[in-house]
Structure formats: structure tokens, C-alpha cells
């Protein structure tokens, strides 16, 4: 079997329709400790900085080679996502636009606790939240539906004046990405759990499936939880433990 060089990305060349790349931030010390981060502003650790640099180089190679197709870079205002976005900005020369609506789920009393602690103290709430029950608030904070709504509102707003063949790169968070993807793709809430979360500095790509300017736009999933090849398989955190970051 022919091996694939580590520097190659599996992101496919852009077509005539607009695309959105959801890009999860690099690792933090709270990711490593399996703590619920939510909207706590935790910086990348050394591993996360390395992940951001490497994945930014992969994305930049594809974006820059896309024959002048317009690229915009959007980021959550939390440091772990913004630092990840800046790694790509440094390579492409594209300015980063910040939008607080791209933050992770507000986790209320759960933020800063390990998942073992949350499971011990809130066994019913965490079980129902993991099942994406619409009315369950993470630690008294946000519901999945509320997170998806603000995420999609932000993305659609920033897409309004993006031309044909354009790509919007969104540096954001794992849990927020999963529910935003599900809503953008039109999945009913009871099926949101069919999408996994993203591993650190992996990305998902959606593309408009209708002609530019169609209202409302519909989207199709091209790639999900993509990173680099070859690398050891890393279980997405939504499958291993319900980390919200």
C-alpha cells in the first residue's frame, strides 16, 4: 500500500460553490486533563501550539493554491481559537475577524470540573445533555439548540457578501461545531448525535449544494474530522468523553 506523506492534506480543491471550513482549536491543558472548558478562556498548551502550526500549514497550502479564490478567516474570541486562527493568518495574510457568537457552550457550574466530577455530581443532567436533549442546560448554562442557533447566525451573516468560490474558515470549538454543522445541514435535533465531535486542530468542510444566491441555501458535508495523514487514530472527544471545549 502506498503511504501518504505527512505534509499532504486531504482537503479537496475548492469548486465553484462557497465553502465553510469548521476548524477546531489546538489542545489546552484543560483538554489534556478532561476538564469542561466551555467559555473559560484557556490558552493553548505547547502541544496545542504545535498542532495549530501544523494544521495551519496544511490548510494554507490548499487555500493559497486555489487560484485566487477569496478566503475569509473568522474566529471565536476565546484565546485557544483565536491563537489557532492567527497561525493560519500568519501564513495566508488574511486578517482574522472575531465573533463572540462562535464561542463554545457556556457550561455554568460544570466549567473547570473534570468529567468524572460532573458525572458524580450531575449524573442525570450529564446523561441527558450527552443525548442532546434540547432543553438540557450544561451546568445551568446553554442548551445545544441555543449554541447551534448563535453559531449558524454568525456564519450565515459572514457569508452574505462572500463571492462564488469563496471559503470561510471558522476557528472555533468542538461541541459548538458539531451542533452548528447539524443545524446547517438541516438534521433534526434527534439526529444531531449522529455527528461526532472534532479532534484538536481537525476540520470539517461543508459546501453549498444550491446555486449561489438561492434562499435559503442548503449545504452538504464534504469532509468531517479531517486532519493529517498518516497519524495514529485519535478518538474524537465526543466519542471518548463528553468534553465541551
Image (tube, rainbow, N blue to C red):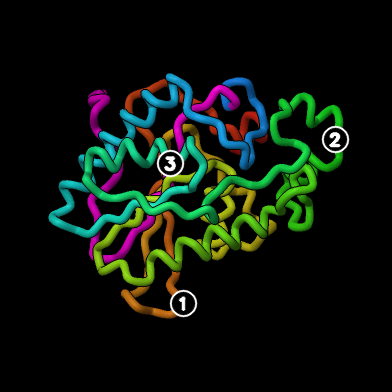
**Label 3 neighbour load within 10 Å: few <14, some 14-19, many 20+:** many
Q: Which mark is residue 89?
A: none
Residue 25 painted magenta? yes
Q: Which of the two discs, 3 and 1, sits closer to the camera?
A: 3
Residue 222 appears in the picture as rendered: no
First in sequence, mark 2 or 1: give its number. Answer: 2
Give the labeled residue for mark 1.
216
First in sequence, mark 3 or 1: give its number. Answer: 3
Spatial CA span between label 2 and label 3: 33 Å
Give the labeled residue for mark 2.
123
Q: Is residue 201 left or right of residue 136?
A: left
Contact between labelled residues 3 and 2, with CB atoms less than 8 Å apart: no
Secondary structure category for the residue under label 2 = helix
First in sequence, mark 2 or 3: give its number. Answer: 3
User: Picture coordinates of residue 206 (x, y %)?
Assistant: 40, 56
User: Picture coordinates of residue 84 (x, y %)?
Assistant: 39, 37
**Label 1 neighbour load within 10 Å: few <14, some 14-19, many 20+:** few
Amino acid at each position: 500500500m502506498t503511504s501518504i506523506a505527512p505534509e499532504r492534506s486531504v482537503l479537496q480543491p475548492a469548486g465553484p460553490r462557497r465553502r465553510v471550513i469548521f476548524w477546531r482549536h489546538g489542545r489546552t491543558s484543560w483538554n489534556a486533563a478532561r476538564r469542561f472548558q466551555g467559555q473559560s478562556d484557556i490558552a493553548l498548551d505547547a502541544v496545542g501550539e504545535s498542532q495549530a502550526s501544523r494544521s495551519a500549514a496544511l490548510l494554507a497550502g490548499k487555500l493559497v493554491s486555489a487560484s485566487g479564490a477569496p478566503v475569509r478567516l473568522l474566529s471565536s474570541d476565546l484565546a485557544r481559537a483565536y491563537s489557532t486562527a492567527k497561525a493560519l493568518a500568519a501564513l495566508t495574510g488574511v486578517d482574522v475577524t472575531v465573533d463572540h457568537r462562535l464561542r463554545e457552550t457556556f457550561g455554568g457550574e460544570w466549567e473547570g470540573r473534570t468529567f468524572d466530577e460532573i458525572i458524580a455530581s450531575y449524573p442525570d443532567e450529564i446523561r441527558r445533555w450527552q443525548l442532546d436533549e434540547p432543553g438540557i442546560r450544561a451546568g445551568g448554562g446553554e442548551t445545544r439548540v441555543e449554541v447551534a442557533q448563535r453559531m449558524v447566525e454568525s456564519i450565515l451573516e459572514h457569508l452574505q457578501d462572500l463571492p462564488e468560490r469563496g471559503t470561510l474558515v471558522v476557528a472555533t470549538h468542538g461541541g459548538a461545531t458539531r451542533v452548528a454543522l447539524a443545524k446547517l445541514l438541516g438534521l433534526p435535533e434527534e439526529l444531531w448525535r449522529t455527528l461526532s465531535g472534532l479532534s484538536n486542530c481537525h476540520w470539517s468542510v461543508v459546501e453549498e449544494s444550491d446555486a449561489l444566491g438561492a434562499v435559503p441555501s442548503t449545504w452538504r458535508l464534504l469532509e468531517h474530522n479531517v486532519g493529517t495523514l498518516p497519524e495514529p487514530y485519535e478518538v474524537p472527544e465526543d466519542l471518548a468523553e463528553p468534553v465541551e471545549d
